[in-house]
Amino acid sequence: MNNNPIGLFDSGVGGTSIWKEIHQLLPYENTIYLADSLNAPYGYKSREEIISLSVKNTELLLKKGCKVIVVACNTATTNTISVLRERFRVPFIGIEPAIKPAALQSKSKSIGILATKGTLNSELFSLATEEFTKDIMITEVIGEGLVPLIEKGDLLSSEISSLLEKFLKPMLANNIDHLVLGCSHYPYLIPQLTKLLPNNIKIIDSGEAVARQTKSIILKNKLQKKANNQPDLQFITNSSDTTLKLLLKEYLEKIYIETRKF
Ligand code: DGL
């Protein structure tokens, strides 16, 4: 089992931001990443639909022998992780918006969160927010339209920039000092966000924390790969592979991308 891969899935290409953190921390581990781009975005689907897509992705990763599964999508985690944990025996690692560190570090007692509709409306998100943000003002904004543009590989366009400007406006009006990125696609917008935000606002995403959690689950379950040899790094997409290739350009020599239906 130890040489079996870590499985990851996302509604599309965004979870590669999480894959990069995991690969950096666990460079010898074999990985399989599923990009369900054909069904992106998940953020506007019903909870039932997100559950059924997440179950389908998990079943495929289990068929490939994955030893742990990283749900590299906030929308899928916040809507389905309890169902997945109940239904399958493999350890799951999820990703949720990093509300807690932002709330703890905020001096202005005001934080912003940019996420999908599916994440912001989920019960798990409301519970986590309630628990950590009693004395904090939260400005929640749905990043409507961002995921489809990122899926197209459109990271630097004026369209993205004007959407971001619109989304940041209410947050800036509320004097936020932390912006939480609650979607695994959004770290790819950090260069654009940095241009639009004043220097005192810190951008927080959950990638590094998810990687640390993945490592600790692997160690706890004694599942670490035995040999420090070249890992097998597989990506499967059910849509065009152009954006995956763009986002993973510095890894192209050591990864394998397959396009097929699932
Ligand atoms: N990467 C997904 C997330 O973290 C995007 C959701 C979507 O497809 O709408 O929420």
Image (spheres, rainbow, N blue to C red):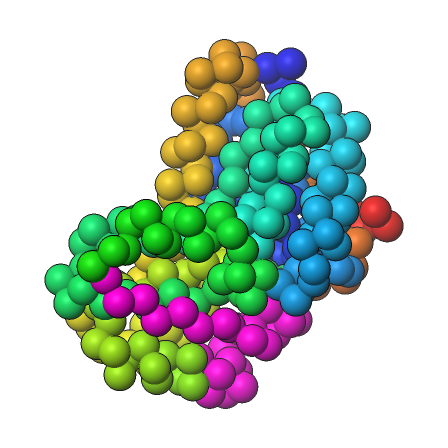
Residue at 23% across, 62% down? 136
Residue 198 quadrant: bottom left
Residue 119 vertical position relative to residue 174 in the rendered view, above or below: above
Task: Indicate whether residue 39 is drawn in magenta.
Answer: no
Residue at 44% across, 27% down? 215
Residue 235 location, x and y as percent? 69, 44
Residue at 38% across, 41% down? 209
Residue 205 location, x and y as percent? 38, 54
Residue at 20% across, 59% down? 135
Query: Where in the image, quadrant-wise, is ligand 1 located?
Result: bottom right
Report whether 87 appears left or right of 142: right
Report whether 110 appears left or right of 262: left
Residue 170 location, x and y as percent? 34, 82
Residue 169 in view of the camera: yes
Residue 6 in view of the camera: no
Name the residue nearer the viewer: 176 or 5: 176
Q: Which quadrant: the N terminus?
A: top right
Residue 212 location, x and y as percent? 39, 34
Q: Which residues are magenta?
A: 136-164
Task: Indicate whether residue 139 is drawn in magenta.
Answer: yes
Residue 47 quadrant: bottom right
Residue 154 vertical position relative to residue 83 in the rendered view, above or below: below
Report whether 17 appears left or right of 209: right
Residue 73 vertical position relative to residue 82 in the rendered view, above or below: below
Name the residue nearer the viewer: 32 or 177: 177
